[in-house]
Image (tube, rainbow, N blue to C red):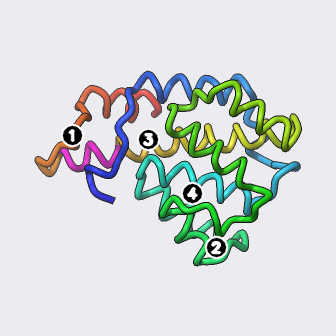
Amino acid sequence: MTPTSMRIHPAATYYRILDALVRAGIGALIRPRAIGKSTVERLMLAVTQVNGCRYCSYLHTRLALRAGVEAEETRALMAGDLEAAPSSEHTALIFAQHMADTEGQPDTEAFDRVLAEYGPEATREITASIRAILIGNLYGIAFDSLLFRLRLRPVPGSTLWRELAILVGSA
């Protein structure tokens, strides 16, 4: 990932998503019952592909492989291609990309489609997983942006204030 492939979000987005995750409860992340680990990792990769966090890309590719996702499928997901994923997960994966594109604020219609297809418990786990990786992506990108800044190569669109607001505010 390069500085130009990372999506830069305001620090307020980070805190809004974190607040939504905490309010919804993080229990869905600890032991997802309605969706499996491989589904969680596919969601993580779909969101990470949109945002461009190299740390999350590395970690969740490894975790996806451990969860039984084939290497070719992980490559396809990181390229934004959902066709290699099970067709039963396409709606959730498209929703994950949509949530990444909308900074964690999906359209009601998109959310309702996921709810109708997967039911309330799975939808709660899907949205919790997506919010968790959004938080991870934004944190990783802020960290990377600060590293590039220290090397005198600031990331376009990022500011020192934004980077510190996410990194220090989360400590």
Give the distance between the C-alpha atoms of the residues marked 4 and 2, in whole angstroms: 11 Å
Amino acid type, mark 2:
Leu
Mark nearer the N terminus (1 vs 4): 4
Which range is magenta?
A: 143-149
123 lies left or right of 11? right
Give the distance between the C-alpha atoms of the residues marked 1 and 4, in whole angstroms: 24 Å
Q: Secondary structure at mark 1?
A: loop
Q: Say the numbered circle drawn on residue 139.
A: 3
Mark nearer the N terminus (4 vs 2): 4
Q: Is residue 145 magenta?
A: yes
User: Disc 4 designates what residue?
Assistant: 45
Q: Residue at x 60, y 53 (%)?
A: 44
Count neighbours of disc 3 (C-alpha within 10 A) and say few if under 14, some if 14 to 19, many if 20 or more: many
Mark nearer the N terminus (1 vs 3): 3
Residue 74 in percent (x, y) is at 58, 69
Count neighbours of disc 2 (C-alpha within 10 A) and say few if under 14, some if 14 to 19, many if 20 or more: some
155 lies left or right of 171? left
Q: How many marks on residues? A: 4
Mark nearer the N terminus (1 vs 2): 2
